[in-house]
Image (tube, rainbow, N blue to C red):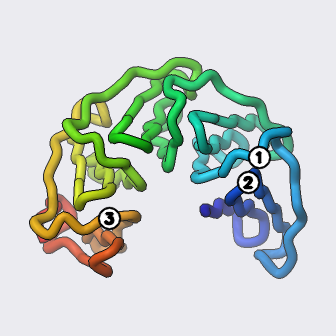
Amino acid sequence: LDVWFRDRDHGFAIGAYGLFLSTDNGGISWDKRHISDDDYHLNAITSMSSNELFIAAEQGHLYHSTDGGFSWSELESPYAGSFFGITSINDDSLLLYGLRGNLYRSNDKGKSWQKIETATEASLMDAYVQNNGNIHIVGLGGNILTSQDKGFNFKLKTREDRKTLTAITETASGHLVMSGSAGISITATGNSIEQ
């Protein structure tokens, strides 16, 4: 369901039923790892540095590593529903999002969470923090949330066709690229979500 690489050779792949794989040769071979006795789906992985990692999982579970993924501990969760994504904003702050439009922000590396209003109950799937500081979150029903204040407040816009968006990233030239049930769309400028 997600991958994370520290460098060209060393990385992790996570997935359904607690699947956690590691590679030290750029993905030529993978070793199965164990991070929890539970078999919750591991949906998304992110980092604040090469040593500090976070995993968002099914049924509100959150995992944290401070040693580059060698060992993991479970964080206290602000919500019992599934999380589909977790995104680092800076060296201390995270966004956590998922089922029914639930969005949370942490200013202390996941020790505590503040609920952020989204004006939607549609699930949120992916987020991207641009170099200019703008944050965009995409989700079901063609919803796009945008923040211009480092994730404290978000404004909701919905695609006219309401087609689901599952991923968002940015090109080297600053254009936002979104994908989902309508295929791939690219913004006219990197500062706007206008199609």
Disc 1 residue type (three-letter):
Asp
Asked if 45 appears above or below 29 in the picture, the reply is above
Q: In which quarter of the view is residue 28 placed? A: bottom right
The reply to whether discs 1 and 2 touch (Cβ–Cβ < 8 Å) is: yes
The reply to whether discs 1 and 3 touch (Cβ–Cβ < 8 Å) is: no
Q: Residues within 10 Å of mark 3 (few under 14, many from 20)?
A: many
Q: Residue furthest top?
A: 112
According to the image, label 2 marks what residue?
17
Disc 3 residue type (three-letter):
Leu
Q: Position of residue 100 (x, y in %)?
A: 36, 41
Q: In which quarter of the view is residue 153 placed? A: top left
According to the image, label 1 marks what residue?
39
Asked if 193 appears above or below 45 in the picture, the reply is below
Marks 2 and 3 sit apart, C-alpha to C-alpha, by 24 Å
Q: Position of residue 141 (x, y in %)?
A: 25, 58
Q: Residues within 10 Å of mark 1 (few under 14, many from 20)?
A: some
Query: Can residue 6 be seen here?
Result: no
Label placed on residue 165: 3
- Residue at (77, 75) in percent of width and height: 26
Secondary element under disc 3, as helix, strand or loop, is strand
Q: Quadrant of the N terminus?
A: bottom right
Circle nearer the N terminus (1, 2):
2
Marks 1 and 2 sit apart, C-alpha to C-alpha, by 4 Å
191 relative to 137 in the view: left or right: left
Circle nearer the N terminus (2, 3):
2
1 relative to 128 in the view: left or right: right
